[in-house]
Amino acid sequence: MFPLRVKRKWEYLRRCVIGGRSHCPNMTVENRHSMDTDPAELIGDPFLPPIHLRRRISHHIMGWYRWGTEFSCYLKMYCGLNKRSHVLEIGCNVGRNAYPLRSDIGPCGSYNGFDIDAEGIAYLQELYAPGYPQFHFTHADLHNTHYNPDGIEAPEHFRFPYDDDSFDIAFAASIFTHMLPNTTAHYFNETARTLKPGGVFLCTFFVRDYYQGKGTNTFGDFEHDCPGFEQSCSVVSLENPELLTAYSLDAIAKFARDAGFEKACTHLYGRWSGKFNNPFNDQEILVFRHGRIGT
């Protein structure tokens, strides 16, 4: 269960943002329903990015808080996150997960994140540097058919900008759901390289095995096989394949095995497919431990 202080914050946000904006002392009748009104201004939190950055990944402020808080909990429960952990986030967007990790990672630990969003990374570098010097953000201009079609570097050849054996924990939240197979395989290999012996990797997928057919979920219809990977990957759009991707369990297992990870030690079901009664996240969550065990 979430701490009481978090429950109170969420309840305040629910009243302020979801249909109850009259509870906000600074919200007038005139701007109560304006799409241009930023609820962050009412909360007064300097670590909430401006609305034009947040909307790239979440259309409402509750989604911002929920997603980050969930992954903070997953990292503690399933990866052993503590104040001294050295953490890598693959695809850190504009800080949705870094936001709650500020209180989870102390000065003896570290957080490193990289992303294709140049403006978001520049914003995070400036925001976090004064108070959180253990947090570092790096821009990578990688091609993606949906999020960065003008990117100059091929992601399947991208070397993560970190030394070998740097991190205790790595995680990729809703990254492989927008990535093609060759790149996903490469990212597993790079994650393994940068993890310390016995390090833990948490990642999310749309698992194709759970897809129930066209019109059965609100995320997208995975009706197209990815060319060249017909048995392992499906996409929503052939014209824009990295809009959404789904992988078979066999394909995911092969990515992990080839990179030196042990069989998934945790498999949490997602709600996207509508197949499961008690899902955890929107997507499936898998946790792998690297097979190199330190002495």
Image: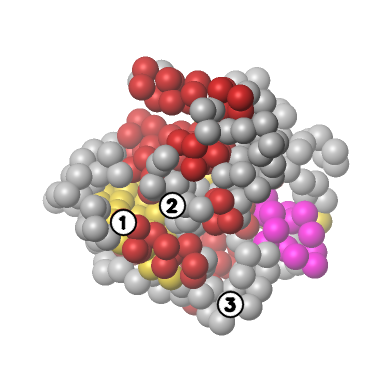
Task: Tell me if residue 242 is in the magenta stretch.
Answer: yes
Q: Is residue 206 left or right of residue 45?
A: right
Residue annotated with mark 2: 95
Residue 151 is tagged as: 3
Q: Amino acid at mark 1?
A: Tyr
Residue in view at x 54 percent, y 28 percent: 24
Q: Which residues are magenta?
A: 234-248
The answer to which of marks 3 and 1 sits earlier in the sequence is 1
At which x and y percent is residue 90? 44, 58
The answer to which of marks 1 and 2 sits earlier in the sequence is 2
Residue annotated with mark 1: 128
Can residue 156 be seen in this snapshot?
A: no
Task: Tell me if residue 37 is in the magenta stretch.
Answer: no
Q: Amino acid at mark 3?
A: Gly
At which x and y percent is residue 248? 65, 48
Q: Is residue 41 left or right of residue 36?
A: left
Q: Judging from the image, what secondary structure is the residue with disc 2 in?
A: loop
The answer to which of marks 3 and 2 sits earlier in the sequence is 2
Corner quadrant of residue 284: top right
Task: Name the image quarter holding the N terminus.
Answer: top left
